[in-house]
């Protein structure tokens, strides 16, 4: 039986900048209520799953910077072709590294779903382009002013040395905005990519 504290755990939103291989670092971040409270880099699938399981709150949504659905044919899904026509830059799924990334993302997404966590796909570089922002510093200012999300000072410090951490924080903000119905998205029958 759950303790009464379980019923009052705050909602959390996760971000994952996933690497194609467990040998390379993946960025992870969590927004609790409306504050980015922790972020860092991890390597193995088990470490990533544990990170999202051991938050002080209940993780409702995780946004992953990785393709979650395959293309029916060719290197790009219809959703990506739409984005390419609008000037976004994406990598084709015919690349070996992208196939490996998708396989890993789908594996982790299945495990998170078993824990009751909704998993969505995003693309931090496209988020910045959509918003007309030049980098992560401008994004944190945007997140604070327009989304009401503050990045804690210690999280901000850890992000300065890692693009993976920066992208994971962007992902977590996308998860927060998607949950609250404030995200934009590109959709086709082959997948949905959430932006802001």
Image (cartoon, grey):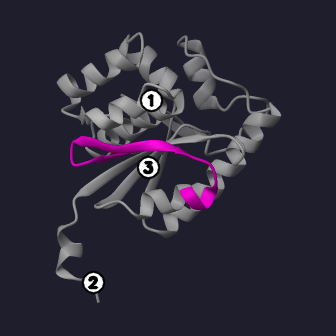
Query: What residue is shown at x 19% (from left), y 75% (from top)?
Result: 5
Question: Up-down: is 18 above or below 185?
Answer: below
Q: Which residue is mark 2?
A: 2
Question: Up-down: is 52 above or below 136?
Answer: below
Question: Would residue 32 be counted in the magenta stretch?
Answer: yes
82 or 161: nearer the viewer: 161
Q: Are marks 2 and 3 in contact (CB under 8 Å)?
A: no
Label 3, residues with CA under 10 Å away: few <14, some 14-19, many ≥20: many
Q: What secondary structure is found at the residue carrying circle 3? A: strand
Q: Is residue 132 left or right of residue 74?
A: left
Q: Name the magenta segment's main secondary structure.
A: strand
Question: Would residue 88 be counted in the magenta stretch?
Answer: no
Q: Which residue is mark 1?
A: 166
Q: Which of the two labelled residues, at mark 2 and mark 3, occupies the earlier sequence position?
A: 2
Label 1, residues with CA under 10 Å away: few <14, some 14-19, many ≥20: many
> What is the magenta range?
30-47
Q: Which residue is mark 3?
A: 62
Q: Is residue 61 left or right of residue 190?
A: left
Q: CA distance from mark 2 to mark 3?
A: 23 Å
Query: What residue is shown at x 70% (from left), y 29% (from top)?
Result: 76
């Amino acid at each position: 039986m759950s303790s009464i504290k379980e019923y009052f755990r705050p909602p959390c939103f996760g971000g994952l900048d996933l690497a194609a291989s467990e040998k390379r670092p993946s960025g992870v971040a969590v927004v609790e209520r409306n504050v980015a409270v922790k972020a860092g880099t991890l390597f193995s699938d088990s470490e990533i799953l544990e990170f999202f399981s051991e938050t002080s709150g209940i993780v409702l949504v995780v946004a992953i910077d990785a393709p979650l659905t395959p293309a029916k044919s060719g290197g790009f899904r219809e959703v990506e072709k739409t984005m390419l026509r609008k000037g976004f830059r994406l990598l084709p799924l015919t690349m070996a590294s992208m196939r490996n990334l998708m396989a890993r993302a789908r594996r982790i997404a299945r495990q998170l779903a078993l824990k009751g966590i909704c998993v969505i796909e995003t693309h931090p570089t496209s988020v910045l382009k959509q918003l007309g922002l030049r980098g992560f510093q401008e994004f944190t200012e945007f997140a604070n002013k327009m989304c009401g999300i503050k990045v804690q000072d210690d999280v901000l410090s850890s992000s300065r040395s890692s693009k993976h951490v920066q992208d994971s924080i962007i992902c977590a903000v996308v998860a927060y905005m998607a949950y609250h119905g404030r995200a934009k998205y590109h959709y086709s029958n082959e997948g949905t990519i959430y932006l802001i």
